[in-house]
Image (cartoon, rainbow, N blue to C red):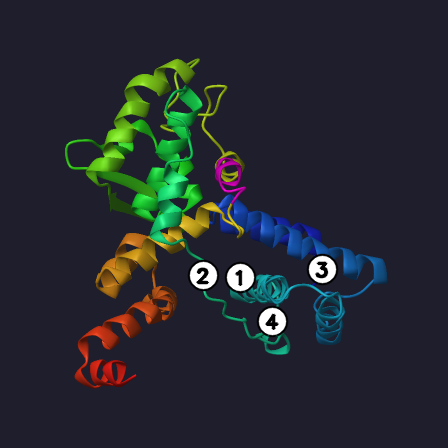
């Protein structure tokens, strides 16, 4: 059976979009990775189901000098594609056995200190519409730990003002409810009552709007964070606030499974990476509380 690689890639992406509810960002990454594989096979006139050709492509991208995370993603994209072909009986042989599972270099997530968060929250001016909106967005990201894609997807109807809750839709359209504290609710209420009506140009379900009155985009939120963190000596993104949210909860004594639920992680192993970030607090607690540690400190 002769398969058209480009057509199968399109079918696969549609499958991920409509059957698996993958996010637009993930779909773009998979499509880009698989089109690279398509171009490689087309330029060399290769049979993409030949195991030697698959191995040669992996060697090719391994020598391209990609960051480890990029290389791993490209290999995973390829594995997933061939798993799809096998599952739907478009190929008879399991070609994933010829695709190695590369090791991911685990990096501890970067997060902000409480002082840095305070500085960031106080950066937008509350004297103008855009400043209030930006403050509301930053407050929401830090107060809830939601992903930027979840934030831009919030509609007016998703906010329960009486209970301080927001309904969000995570990866693969999984629904969950996040809690919002009083301080964050105040700034959200200010944005809702004073700013949003002035930004609105026509009927729009989205809660957070751009300057033209439409739903704010992922890129728009990233630009907002970048705007207010120029003076920070570290690269900060909306996801940094998600990491910060989780870290501060754990440092405050929150149970790991509670944090897992708030973050919307399917596996607790994903949440466990944040436990490595609280070592300093553990050391401080030990130094203050443990008799042997106190004695040693006094002797010194």
Q: Is 165 within the magenta?
A: no
Q: Compare residues 275 and 105 and report the one nearer the observer.
A: 275
**Circle 3: is it few (<14), some (14-19), or many (20+) Cα within 10 Å?**
many
Q: Quadrant of residue 68?
A: bottom right
Residue at x 30%, y 74% (from the top left corner): 283
Which circle's residue, 4 or 3, is located before the other in the chain? Answer: 3
Secondary structure category for the residue under label 3: helix
**Cα distance between the residues tagged 2 and 4:** 41 Å
Q: Secondary structure at mark 4?
A: loop
Q: Dot 2: what SS?
A: loop
Q: Which residues are magenta?
A: 224-231
Q: What residue do we see at 55% from left, 75% from top?
A: 103
Task: Using the image, determine if residue 108 lies above or below residue 249.
Answer: below
Q: Nearer the viewer, mark 2 or mark 3?
A: 2
For this rendering, which residue is in front, 182 or 46? Answer: 182
Q: Please say whether residue 226 is one of the residues in the magenta stretch.
A: yes
Question: Mainly helix, strand or loop, the magenta region?
Answer: helix
**Nearer-the-camera pick, 62 or 281:** 281
Residue 289 in the figure: left or right of residue 116 = left
Mark 4 vs 3: CB contact within 8 A? no
Cα distance, mark 1 to mark 4?
A: 10 Å
Q: Which mark is residue 138?
A: none
Which of pointers 2 and 3 lies earlier in the amino acid sequence?
A: 3
Q: Of residues 162 and 20, which is closer to you in this image?
A: 162
Q: Position of residue 24 (x, y in %)?
A: 52, 44
Q: CA distance from mark 1 to mark 3?
A: 20 Å
Q: Residue at x 35, y 15 (%)?
A: 197
As measured in the structure, the alpha-carbon distance from the residue carrying label 2 to the one carrying label 3 is 30 Å
Q: Is residue 21 visible?
A: no
Provide the residue designation for mark 2: 109
Residue wearing tag 1: 88
Report the Cα–Cα distance between label 4 and label 3.
Answer: 20 Å
């Amino acid at each position: 059976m002769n398969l058209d690689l480009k057509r199968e890639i399109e079918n696969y992406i549609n499958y991920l979009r409509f059957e698996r509810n993958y996010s637009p960002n993930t779909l773009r990454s998979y499509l880009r990775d698989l089109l690279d594989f398509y171009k490689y096979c087309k330029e060399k006139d290769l049979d993409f189901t030949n195991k030697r050709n698959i191995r040669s492509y992996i060697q090719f991208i391994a020598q391209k000098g990609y960051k480890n995370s990029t290389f791993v993603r490209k290999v995973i994209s390829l594995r997933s594609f061939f798993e799809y072909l096998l599952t739907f009986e478009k190929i008879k042989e399991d070609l994933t056995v010829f695709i190695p599972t590369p090791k991911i270099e685990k990096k501890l997530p970067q997060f902000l200190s409480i002082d840095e968060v305070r500085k960031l929250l106080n950066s937008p001016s509350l004297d103008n519409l855009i400043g209030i909106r930006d403050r509301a967005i930053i407050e929401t990201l830090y107060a809830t730990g939601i992903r930027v894609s979840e934030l831009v997807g919030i509609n007016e109807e998703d906010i329960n003002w009486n209970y301080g809750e927001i309904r969000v839709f995570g990866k693969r359209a999984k629904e969950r409810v996040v809690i919002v504290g009083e301080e964050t609710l105040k700034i959200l209420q200010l944005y809702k009552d004073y700013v949003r009506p002035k930004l609105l140009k026509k009927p729009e379900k989205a809660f957070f709007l751009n300057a033209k009155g439409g739903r704010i985009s992922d890129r728009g939120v990233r630009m907002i964070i970048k705007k207010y963190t120029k003076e920070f000596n570290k690269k900060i993104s909306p996801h940094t606030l998600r990491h910060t949210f989780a870290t501060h909860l754990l440092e405050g004594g929150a149970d790991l499974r509670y944090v897992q639920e708030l973050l919307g992680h399917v596996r607790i192993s994903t949440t466990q990476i944040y436990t490595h970030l609280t070592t300093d607090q553990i050391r401080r607690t030990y130094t203050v509380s443990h008799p042997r540690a106190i004695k040693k400190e006094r002797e010194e």
